[in-house]
Amino acid sequence: MLTAAFLLFFVTPALEHTEGKKDETVIPGVEVFLDEHLDWVKDQRVGLVTNMTGVDRNLDSTADLFYEHEDINMTAMYGPEHGIRGNVEAGEYIESYIDERTGLPVYSLYGPTWKPTEDMLEDVDVLVFDIQDIGSNVYTYIYTLGFVMEAAAEERMPVIVLDRPNAIGGERVEGPLRTADTVSFMGRYLLPVRHGMTAGELAVMWNHEHALGVDLRVAEMQGWNVICTLRIQDYLG
């Protein structure tokens, strides 16, 4: 069972980390989105891909913030490994279910399918991704993002990534690439062991390098001042 300590390991250090500016706080993409980019989902039915790491600086859940917001019409959620609320053991098969707090359907992306199906997206106009990654190619969450982008491309559906810090920093890339013959769920998009990027940067790179054609927007963080190996702006020109 995942604990509060697990959540704090992912979120708290990352949100306090900056390079060269000790007093500056990182504002995660979810807060930037809610403050500045609600027009991106105006009059749209929102599907949220998230889990227990999708929180603001007060540790309020993105799922709850979206559900309670008068200007967001959230109609479905999508759960990766460990589920939406982080109460499922690692590697455990997950069925789709109804979330007790919101009454909304939670479609499993770690069960019968890894990629949202056409039926799962029937009542959604735009997909929003908000999950804290660990910065390594051996974690499943970034590959869930890749599968979500593939499905969105097939359905011509926009994707919004609410960006979060790379928990082990964005200054270094280390380790070998996974070989093509060992690709499964993890490793679908070949990355070094330590990839040095944020989820938003990975999404932009994959959309470009794999010609996915996704209508992609990234709610960038404020105060994230590391020198990253890839800047989102490199692929926006």
Image: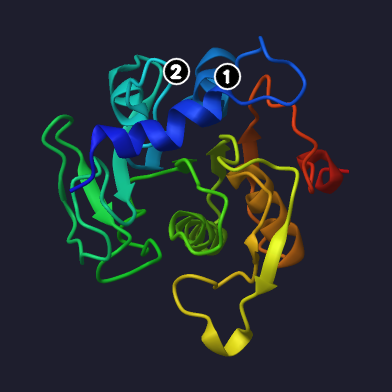
- As drawn, the residue found furthest toward the left would be 100
Q: Residues within 10 Å of mark 1 (few under 14, many from 20)?
A: many
Residue 94 picture quarter? bottom left
What amino acid is labelled 1 in the image?
Answer: Ile
Judging from the image, what secondary structure is the residue with disc 1 in? Answer: loop
Residue 155 drawn at (x, y percent): 50, 59
Q: Residue at x 74, y 50 (%)?
A: 172
Residue 170 picture quarter? top right
Q: Is residue 44 visible?
A: no
Looking at the picture, tell me which residue is in the foreground, 161 or 181: 181
Residue 40 drawn at (x, y percent): 57, 28
Answer whether labels 2 and 1 touch (C-beta < 8 Å). Answer: yes
- In this picture, is 220 found above or below 92? above
- In this picture, is 35 found above or below 225? above
Residue bearing the label numbered 1: 27
Residue 39 picture quarter? top right
Image disc number at residue 157? none
For marks 2 and 1, the one nearer the N-term is 1
Image disc number at residue 57? 2
Looking at the picture, tell me which residue is in the foreground, 142 or 129: 142
